Structure formats: structure tokens, C-alpha cells
Image: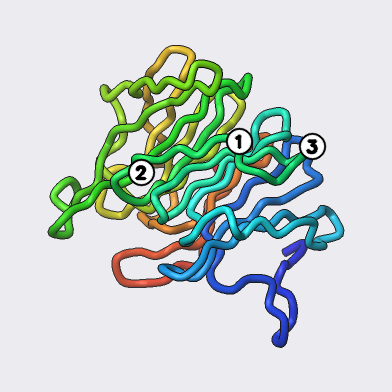
Amino acid sequence: LRQTLAGTPSAPAFVDRVNALSFSPDGKLLATGGGEPSRSGELKLWRLPEGTLERDLGALHSDAVTAVAFSPRGDRLATAGTDRFARITGLQTNAPRFNLEGHTHHVIGLAWSPDGGVLGVRGRSLGGSRGGAARGHQRDGAAWDPRTDRWRPLASEGAPGPRAYHRAVWTGSEMIVTGEFLAGSLGGRYRPDVDAWSPLSMEGAPTGREMHSAVWTGSEMLVWGGVSSTFVLSDGAGF
């Protein structure tokens, strides 16, 4: 363990669990997303390697933040939450530049295209009984181009199974989706340049989980924590 952001007992760094992490392209900032479910969203920028609070952007979401992603140039931050909004904020002004609304339920996954011109968004729908698609989970997604303000659907062939509370990271050329212990698969890899999915290897993979943390280091994806069907998990793996 190299560093911990925890604050003090009298002044904790976070009001509740941290749901999402994203490093800026230059590695100098870490964005953390979380909040108190059904009460408030929490979004903070931390200066690295000092570990000091750079900015508090908590007012951007009215409910827990579930996903954060720096744009490839590091000048914008995409965020999503259980308030059913995805937002793109300019870090020069701290003001939302785009508010992506109309989602029917929680927005829980984000990924930028390599040129920063397209943002991919994944979420879940309203549902009933527990168990894959019947639970209301979906296995589709869309990409939004801010230059034209238009959406396009992502390919469905080869996409991972229906899921919620999963995570998505951007590698520079593809989006990797992981999580959801009921989905029947660990996740998948999506390449926007060819609009195609491929499966993740199961060799050495961590156990099924959701609500975990997943980050891209520049060379590999790290997955840690989360919950299974019965336990809070304290392990992870690199891919």
C-alpha cells in the first residue's frame, strides 16, 4: 500500500463509500466519486503525489456518483450517478458543459474515445425480480458525440450479459467492462473504431463482484473490492 486518502476521525475524507476512481492523463490528479446514497453526491479532485484535496465538485450530482472519467487531454471530467444524469464538466471553470439526461435509471459506466470526441455511457433500467435481465438489467449502451450532439447505439453482438453496478475503464483504444455476479460473464472489451466486442479472459480472474473499483494505470486494469452475493470483498486482480 503506497498511500491512503482517509482524512482524520474528526474530518474524514469521504462522507461514505468511494464508488469510482480516475487518474488524469498526466497522473497529477485523482478524481474520486461517491456520496451518501439517496442523499448527496460527492466528487473530489486530489493532487498527486501529495494526496491533498485540490477541488471539491460535490454539487454536480444530487445522488451518489457511480463513474468518473478524465478526457484524453485532461481538460474535461465526465461523471455519472444514481441521479440518472451524466455530465461533462470543464475543469477550467468547474461548470458543467453538457448535461446528458433522459436515462431511465442509474448511469454507472463512462468511457471516452481516444480523441475525446465521443463519450460512451452505460446504465441500468427499472426492473423487478432478481436475476439477470429479469432484474431489469440491460446489455446495451450508446456513444455520444459532443461535436454533433448525437447518439449512436453500441454493437450488441458479443456484448457482455445484462448487468448493473459494473465498472468501465478506457485503455486508450478500448473500453473494458467488468462486474456483476449474476450476469454469467466477467465482462467484455469494446473497440469503438470497429464497433465490436470481445470477451475477457477468465484465467486468473477475480470472483464475480459488483460495486467494485476499477482503474486503468496506463498499462493494465486493476480491480479491487466490491460485493458478491453474500460478502463484502477485500481482494482484486490486475488485467
In the structure shown, which secondary structural element does the residue marked by tag 2 occupy? strand
Residue pointed to by mark 2 = 123
In the structure shown, which secondary structural element does the residue marked by tag 1 occupy? strand
Q: Residue at x 36, y 51 (%)?
A: 106
Q: Quadrant of the N terminus?
A: bottom right
The foreground one among 184 and 16 is 16
- Against 191, is 5 above or below? below
Residue pointed to by mark 1 = 97
The amino acid on which the numbered mark 3 sits, given as a three-letter code, is Asp
Give coordinates of residue 5: x percent, y percent.
Answer: 72, 67
Which badge, 2 or 3, is on the more N-terminal residue? 3
Label 2, label 3: how many angstroms apart (C-alpha)?
Answer: 28 Å
Kindly indicate the quadrant of the structure image that contains residue 239: top right
The foreground one among 85 and 200 is 85
| Front label number (3 vs 1) | 1
The amino acid on which the numbered mark 2 sits, given as a three-letter code, is Gly
In the structure shown, which secondary structural element does the residue marked by tag 3 occupy? loop
- Against 69, is 40 above or below? below
Residue pointed to by mark 3 = 26
Q: Which residue in the rendered view is the most extreme toward the right?
A: 50
The amino acid on which the numbered mark 1 sits, given as a three-letter code, is Arg
Q: Residue at x 72, y 34 (%)?
A: 74
